[in-house]
Image: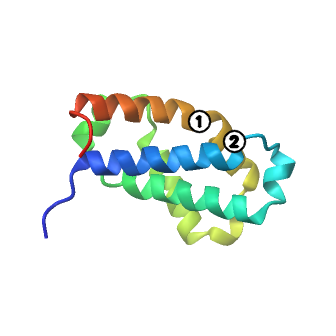
Amino acid sequence: MPKRDIRLFLLDMLEAIEKIERYIVGLTFEGFEYNEMVVDAVVRNLEIIGEAARHIPEELRQRYTGVDWRRVVGFRNIIIHEYFDVDLEIVWAIATTQLGDLKAILQAMLADLGGRG
Protein backbone atom coordinates (compact mmCIF):
# COMPACT_ATOMS: atom_id res chain seq x y z
CA MET A 1 0.00 0.00 0.00
CA PRO A 2 1.51 3.36 -0.98
CA LYS A 3 2.37 5.77 1.76
CA ARG A 4 -0.13 8.64 2.09
CA ASP A 5 1.18 12.06 1.08
CA ILE A 6 1.88 14.30 4.09
CA ARG A 7 -0.04 17.11 2.40
CA LEU A 8 -3.21 15.03 2.66
CA PHE A 9 -2.84 14.88 6.43
CA LEU A 10 -2.43 18.65 6.51
CA LEU A 11 -5.56 19.00 4.38
CA ASP A 12 -7.43 16.67 6.75
CA MET A 13 -6.46 18.91 9.65
CA LEU A 14 -7.47 22.08 7.81
CA GLU A 15 -10.82 20.59 6.83
CA ALA A 16 -11.49 19.56 10.43
CA ILE A 17 -10.66 23.07 11.67
CA GLU A 18 -12.96 24.63 9.08
CA LYS A 19 -15.78 22.31 10.11
CA ILE A 20 -15.32 23.23 13.77
CA GLU A 21 -15.36 26.92 12.84
CA ARG A 22 -18.69 26.42 11.04
CA TYR A 23 -20.20 24.37 13.86
CA ILE A 24 -19.50 26.89 16.61
CA VAL A 25 -20.13 30.15 14.76
CA GLY A 26 -22.46 32.32 16.84
CA LEU A 27 -22.44 30.01 19.85
CA THR A 28 -21.56 30.85 23.43
CA PHE A 29 -20.04 28.21 25.68
CA GLU A 30 -23.48 27.57 27.14
CA GLY A 31 -24.99 27.11 23.69
CA PHE A 32 -22.16 24.77 22.81
CA GLU A 33 -22.31 22.80 26.04
CA TYR A 34 -26.02 22.02 25.71
CA ASN A 35 -25.97 21.10 22.02
CA GLU A 36 -24.84 17.49 22.05
CA MET A 37 -24.64 17.24 18.25
CA VAL A 38 -22.27 20.20 18.08
CA VAL A 39 -20.23 18.85 20.99
CA ASP A 40 -19.96 15.46 19.29
CA ALA A 41 -19.02 17.04 15.96
CA VAL A 42 -16.36 19.30 17.48
CA VAL A 43 -14.86 16.51 19.58
CA ARG A 44 -14.78 14.20 16.54
CA ASN A 45 -12.98 16.80 14.45
CA LEU A 46 -10.46 17.48 17.23
CA GLU A 47 -9.85 13.73 17.19
CA ILE A 48 -9.23 13.88 13.43
CA ILE A 49 -6.79 16.77 13.91
CA GLY A 50 -4.86 14.79 16.51
CA GLU A 51 -4.85 11.61 14.45
CA ALA A 52 -3.61 13.41 11.34
CA ALA A 53 -0.96 15.22 13.42
CA ARG A 54 0.45 11.83 14.47
CA HIS A 55 1.43 11.27 10.84
CA ILE A 56 3.42 14.49 10.44
CA PRO A 57 7.11 13.48 10.41
CA GLU A 58 9.28 14.74 13.25
CA GLU A 59 11.64 16.58 10.90
CA LEU A 60 8.70 18.56 9.51
CA ARG A 61 7.28 19.21 12.98
CA GLN A 62 10.62 20.67 14.05
CA ARG A 63 10.42 23.28 11.29
CA TYR A 64 7.10 24.55 12.65
CA THR A 65 7.70 25.19 16.32
CA GLY A 66 4.56 27.33 16.66
CA VAL A 67 2.58 24.12 17.11
CA ASP A 68 2.81 22.08 20.29
CA TRP A 69 2.55 18.80 18.39
CA ARG A 70 2.67 16.67 21.54
CA ARG A 71 -0.37 18.48 22.94
CA VAL A 72 -2.28 18.18 19.66
CA VAL A 73 -1.70 14.42 19.55
CA GLY A 74 -2.09 14.11 23.32
CA PHE A 75 -5.54 15.65 23.30
CA ARG A 76 -6.57 13.15 20.63
CA ASN A 77 -5.41 10.37 22.95
CA ILE A 78 -7.52 11.78 25.79
CA ILE A 79 -10.56 11.96 23.52
CA ILE A 80 -10.06 8.37 22.36
CA HIS A 81 -9.12 6.72 25.63
CA GLU A 82 -10.86 8.88 28.23
CA TYR A 83 -13.90 9.99 26.27
CA PHE A 84 -16.06 9.88 29.41
CA ASP A 85 -13.88 12.47 31.09
CA VAL A 86 -13.42 15.08 28.33
CA ASP A 87 -13.69 18.58 29.79
CA LEU A 88 -15.99 20.64 27.56
CA GLU A 89 -14.45 23.88 28.80
CA ILE A 90 -11.11 22.70 27.44
CA VAL A 91 -12.73 21.62 24.16
CA TRP A 92 -14.38 25.05 23.89
CA ALA A 93 -11.13 26.87 24.68
CA ILE A 94 -9.27 24.91 22.02
CA ALA A 95 -12.02 25.48 19.46
CA THR A 96 -12.29 29.21 20.12
CA THR A 97 -8.73 30.28 20.91
CA GLN A 98 -6.20 27.84 19.50
CA LEU A 99 -7.41 26.59 16.15
CA GLY A 100 -6.89 29.90 14.34
CA ASP A 101 -3.15 29.83 14.99
CA LEU A 102 -2.94 26.15 14.08
CA LYS A 103 -4.86 26.81 10.87
CA ALA A 104 -2.43 29.55 9.82
CA ILE A 105 0.58 27.31 10.46
CA LEU A 106 -1.00 24.40 8.58
CA GLN A 107 -1.69 26.68 5.62
CA ALA A 108 1.96 27.82 5.66
CA MET A 109 3.14 24.22 5.85
CA LEU A 110 0.96 23.24 2.93
CA ALA A 111 2.21 26.18 0.87
CA ASP A 112 5.82 25.30 1.70
CA LEU A 113 5.20 21.71 0.61
CA GLY A 114 3.73 22.75 -2.70
CA GLY A 115 0.01 22.93 -2.09
CA ARG A 116 -2.49 20.14 -2.46
CA GLY A 117 -1.52 16.49 -2.15
Q: Is residue 114 visible?
A: yes
Residue at mark 1: 98
Label 2 packing within 10 angstroms: few (<14), some (14-19), many (20+): few
51 or 19, nearer to the observer: 19
49 or 110, nearer to the observer: 110
- What SS does tag 2 mark? helix
93 sits to left or right of 66 = right
Q: Residue at x 60, y 48 (%)?
A: 20
Residue at mark 2: 93
On screen, 95 above or below 111? below
Q: Residue at x 36, y 46 (%)?
A: 11
Q: Of the residues under marks 2 and 1, which one precedes in the sequence?
A: 2
- What SS does tag 1 mark? helix
Residue 72, position as x, y percentages in the image: 48, 47
Residue 116, position as x, y percentages in the image: 26, 41
4 sits to left or right of 106 = left
On screen, 105 above or below 27? above
Label 1 packing within 10 angstroms: few (<14), some (14-19), many (20+): few
For the residues labelled 2 and 1, say whether their Cβ atoms are less than 8 Å apart. Answer: yes
The kind of residue tagged 2 is Ala
Q: Residue at x 57, y 62 (%)?
A: 44
Residue 12, position as x, y percentages in the image: 40, 51
Q: Is residue 56 visible?
A: no
86 sits to left or right of 8 = right
The kind of residue tagged 1 is Gln
User: Marks 2 and 1, Cα distance to the nearest angstrom?
Assistant: 7 Å
Q: Hey, which residue is sitting farthest left in the picture?
A: 2
